[in-house]
Amino acid sequence: MLKKIALFVFMFALSIGAMAQIKFGHMNSQQVIVTMPEYTKAQADMDALSKKYNQEMQRTQDEFNKKLQEYQASADSLPKNISERRQKELQDMAQRQEQFQQEAYQSMQKAQQEAMAPIYKKLDDAIQAVGKAEGLIYIFDIARTPIPYVGTQSEDVTAKVKTQLGVK
């Protein structure tokens, strides 16, 4: 019986000692990502693509407005069948414009995801390297997953991840 108690106390002490070795980390990926040159390039590429789409949308809007003004200026003097045809033409233009805006939005979202995927992969690889080097059990990313409380026992490894990536 004494051996069982001694064994129990030993196991309890061992588990407390093991718990003292458990280390957690946290970081803010947004603070890291914005310093990465890949991110800066991706943002510049996205801005250029957005500008092209906006220019095309503006061009088609201007074209639509011009045709609408022409129609409104002559609508009273046109025969009914010509007036209806021009109305239909204006409706078709408006539908094509709306469809293009939706396609542009979807294309921008896809381009954003494709541009960010390798950046997040590189970041995740750096986080894993820091976690292994520091002997951490978990690294919580407070930018991706809201964590209502981070205690002082959790180590902020944001700077170490930046160092791992070679950014400041």
Image: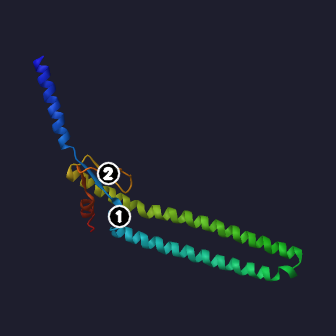
Residue beneath the point at 33% across and 63% down: 31
Relative horizontal placement of residue 47, taking residue 136 as reference (left or right): right
Residue 114: quarter of image: bottom left
According to the picture, the residue beneath numbered tag 1 turns out to be: 33
Relative horizontal placement of residue 140, taking residue 82 as reference (left or right): left
Q: Quadrant of the N terminus?
A: top left
Position above or below: 152 against 15: below
Give the CA separation, mark 1 to mark 2.
15 Å
Q: Position of residue 25 (x, y in %)?
A: 26, 51
Position above or below: 126 against 136: below
Dot 2: few (<14), some (14–19), or many (≥20) neighbours within 10 Å?
Answer: many
Mark positioned earlier in the residue sequence (1 or 2): 1
- Are the residues tagged 1 and 2 within 8 Å (C-beta)? no
Residue beneath the point at 73% across and 69% down: 92
Q: Quadrant of the C terminus?
A: bottom left
According to the picture, the residue beneath numbered tag 2 turns out to be: 140
Residue at the extreme top of the image, as rendered? 1
Q: At label 2, which amino acid type do we have?
A: Phe
Q: Which mark is residue 55?
A: none
Q: At label 1, which amino acid type do we have?
A: Ile
Residue at the extreme right of the image, as rendered? 79
Q: Helix or strand or loop: what does disc 2 sit on?
A: strand
Dot 1: few (<14), some (14–19), or many (≥20) neighbours within 10 Å?
Answer: many
Q: Helix or strand or loop: what does disc 1 sit on?
A: helix
For the residue pair 146 and 81, the one nearer the viewer reads as 146
Q: Position of residue 112 (x, y in %)?
A: 47, 64
